[in-house]
Image (cartoon, rainbow, N blue to C red):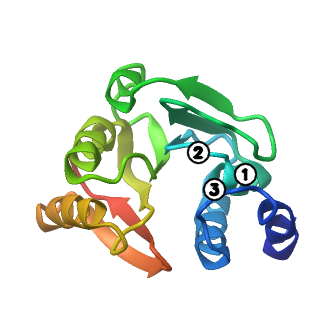
Amino acid sequence: MNFKEVWEKVEKVSGWFSEEEAFLLYVITKQQPLEAVIVEMGTAYGRSGSVINLSGRKLITIDKNPEWQGIGAPEIIKGDSFEVSKQFKDESVDMFFLDGDHDYLSVKIDISAWLPKVRIGGAVLFHDFESWHGVTEAVQEISAQGKIWKQFKLGSLLYSIKLHD
């Protein structure tokens, strides 16, 4: 399925994810192996998760109050990000997409809980970078610490690569 076909389906799902952001997410997801472990923190209605599902990869999505109305059948885990992260081994996640709570403290907690779970060289994506102060500040901190290498930004979606914990 090409991106145009994906977007024709995904744009019907409620959410706050633009076409250009969906394109970047789709391209990064398609680069992952078919058996990749892909985790999304922040499900909402499933717009971004639908992009991942339509890429042919398996999605694990986490939210305190998921309201999935998206395409496909991801594994949905209802719970607190920090607590759920304890169920995953360190460096067991190939791609992590963060779009949970947007205040600084919540983003910082999500990053500290999940970054160790992502393998070295794994993809780490942040939605609402430079759109929400809390997201931007927390991401800039880990970037300054050399934990991630910011690769590319489209809309408010930042794609980065994990360098170390």
Please name whichever residue, 14 or 30, is drawn nearer the observer in this view of the structure: 14
Image quadrant assignment for residue 23: bottom right
Above or below for 140 versus 62: below
Residues at marks 3 and 1, CA–CA distance in whole angstroms: 5 Å
**Quick one: quadrant of the N terminus?**
bottom right
Residues at marks 2 and 1, CA–CA distance in whole angstroms: 11 Å
User: At numbered mark 1, what does the secondary structure look like: helix, strand or loop?
Assistant: helix
Q: Residue at x 50, y 44 (%)?
A: 42
Callout 1 amino acid: Ser
Please name whichever residue, 157 or 30, is drawn nearer the observer in this view of the structure: 157
Q: Which dot marks residue 50?
A: 1
Q: How many marks?
A: 3
Mark 2 nearby-residue class (10 Å; few <14, some 14–19, many ≥20): many
Sequence order check, earlier mark of 2 and 1? 2
User: At numbered mark 3, what does the secondary structure look like: helix, strand or loop?
Assistant: helix
**Residue 147 screen position, x and y as percent:** 21, 57
Callout 3 amino acid: Ser
**Residue 104 screen position, x and y as percent:** 22, 53
In contact (CB < 8 Å): disc 3 and disc 1: yes
Q: Residue at x 62, y 73 (%)?
A: 18
Mark 1 nearby-residue class (10 Å; few <14, some 14–19, many ≥20): many
Residue tagged 2: 44
User: At numbered mark 2, what does the secondary structure look like: helix, strand or loop?
Assistant: loop
Q: Residue at x 52, y 34 (%)?
A: 62
**Residue 75 screen position, x and y as percent:** 66, 29
Residue tagged 3: 48
Callout 2 amino acid: Ala
